[in-house]
Amino acid sequence: MQTLMKLEGITKIYGEGNLSVEALRGVNLEVGVGDYLAVMGPSGSGKSTLMHILGLLDSPTSGSYLLDGEEVSTFSRRRLAHLRNKKIGFIFQNFNLLPKASLLRNVELPLLYGGMGRKDRRLLAYEALAKVGLADRAKHRPNELSGGQRQRGAIARAIVGSPSVIMADEPTGNLDQQTGIEILELFDELRAGGQTLIMVTHDPNIAARARETIRLVDGLILPNGQRAAA
Amino acid sequence: MNPSQFFREGLVEIREHLGRTLLQTLGVILGVASVVATLGMTSSMDARRDQYFRESGGTLLMGVYNQPPGELEMTARQRAKTGLKLSDAAAIRDTIDGFDLVVAEIARNHRVRAGATEERFRITAIEPEFMQMRELTMGSGRYITPHDMETAAAVVVLGSTRARELFGTADPVGKLLNIDGKAYTVVGVTKEMVFYWQRSDNYNAHEWLNRLIVVPITSYMKRHQEAGAERIDELNLRLRSPEAHEEARKTLELLLRSRHGIEDFGVWDRKERIDQGNQEGMIYNLTFLACGIISLLVGGIVVANIMLASFTERMREVGVRKALGATGWQIFAQFLIETMVVTVCGGGVGLALGIVGTWGIMNVMQMEMVVTPLMVAVALLAASLVGFVFGMYPAVKAGRLDPVVALRYE
């Protein structure tokens, strides 16, 4: 299995001196291409911080993070933004679609920031929307769509740039059970197409749909034995 | 991401918050409107004034008139030297190159009779170049000629109003006119000159030219003055070029002072008056411009304030955009261009308002309005500058926002 992400001794400390908080205390993790990984843990365990670092939204205080063989832990914010644009697709609990823009324009955004021309953008955005079954809703605004449709739109936005990995933060948290299942089925399809997925959740039933689960407690990943048991 | 995209985002922002945007740009609108109106009014008035001068001999006219120094005790000898004389005109012609036309003038009131009509009128005795100087054209007949001057011919040219008063609707050319008992032949009538400062005004600024009764200065001196008298009332001068102004004026005063031994004359000078007028206009303009600029500054502060107030509301948006790969620079550019789109739209509205305002004022004053490219350029430039300067801080703030913090913001 080819390694996509490799974390060694990742720490993240917020604040300074007596007030500092150690969110991550030496995380080691390897994610292969095509993996479907669930990250579980109670609130305050550091799973959001880990997500942010994996998703290049934040840099670790110390440790090494290899993404596609590149050491990214010391990248500037600008380079991180470019890399984020090319390699990471985000899906949020509350969808985070821009309310003033049509679904199509929302889906086009990552391509726009990547510098792609208008025609190509449009084409790829329609393709992505077709994949999640929303091609006929392209011109609608987010507030004209149901929760499930919004999240599927957000998935289209995440996959439109063919990222190396999709990071989903509680993707079903704001959806009813049935709609949540539909979203997870969509993840299964993506996974079957070879897409790497990392999903943060606190729901064991949802985590169970991933191929692997890691548990984070107090800024540390529980040892392998327990990881298998989860 | 190209600028046109940012531009679209800006338009969306305006459409979404029309009321807020309007309030936000009110200062800019009023500022630009005031600046545009100031420029509009002064350009319109300047254009009108230039036209007046253009139609009555240009900006290069100058004149010298008698202005005896008061209270000064003079000897008879001194007194004999003072006052403008015909020889002064010759001296100016001979020594000052800066004037291309020099016309001596005597203007006195006399009893004028034509047929049954008799009245006291002012008689203007001049040299033939007066026609060229004042850009007069003939309605009928001819003007005074150099030949009339040489022969001191008893000929007279009437302004159109005087011709009507003295001879009614009949063509007076060839008819006789009696000035203080001396008979003159009417040889021409000048065409009516018209200039109204304001539309439907009843004051014709050129009417005095229509009321002239003009005779050759030599004829006048021969018939209406004692022999040997050579005093004249005024010297009309025209500069060869605007560049000649300073030098010619200085030499003129020097020459007359040395010839008269005393400063017994006054000078009127169109160019000087225009320059003074421009200077006064400038002060007036600057006052208005200052008001406009202060309004623009206040407008800019309001723009920045509202951008910052809406900032928290848009933090999540910034976070999402950054998560999708927007760089700080791209966010900065988006916010800055958005602000500039808002202020430039305000500038456009201000421009329209300023033009309408100027038009209204000019209409009340019954004057023509002039819209210059400068007004448009100043309006749009000022508006974009305000957007740039006051959009900078919110844009920098948005660009620097940490995506993690921005995304977490509820």
Image (cartoon, coloured by chain):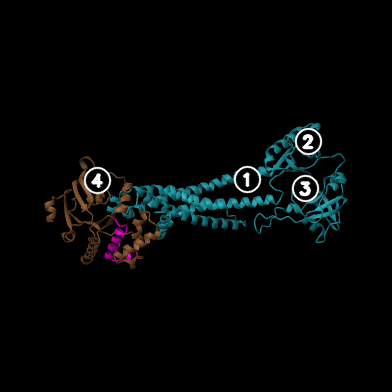
Chain colours: A brown, B cyan
Q: Mark 1 or 3 closer to N-term?
A: 3
Residue bearing mark 4: A60
Q: Is residue A56 magenta?
A: no
- Up the image or down, A8 lies above or below B371; here it is above
Q: Nearer the viewer, residue B219 or A40?
A: A40
Kind of residue indicated by mark 1 = Gly
Question: Is A229 on the left-hand or right-hand side of A181?
Answer: left
Decide which of tag 2 and tag 3 comes sooner along the chain. Answer: 2
State the residue position of label 3: B130
Q: Secondary structure at mark 1?
A: helix
Left of B305 or right of it: where is B350?
right
Camera-near label (2 vs 3) is 3
> Mark 2 sits on what residue?
B82
Given the image, on which type of amino acid does mark 4 rest? Pro
Q: Percent x, y for residue A140?
A: 35, 65
The residue indicated by pointer 1 is B277
Mark 3 belongs to which subunit? Answer: B
Residue A149 part of the magenta segment: yes
Residue type, numbered disc 3: Phe
SS category of the residue bearing label 2: loop
Q: Are marks 2 and 1 on the same chain?
A: yes
Q: Residue at x 66, y 44 (%)?
A: B273
The dominant secondary structure in magenta is helix
Quarter holding residue A137: bottom left
- Please indicate whether residue A210 sits to the left or right of residue B244 in the image: left
**Chain identifier of the residue bearing label 4 in the image:** A
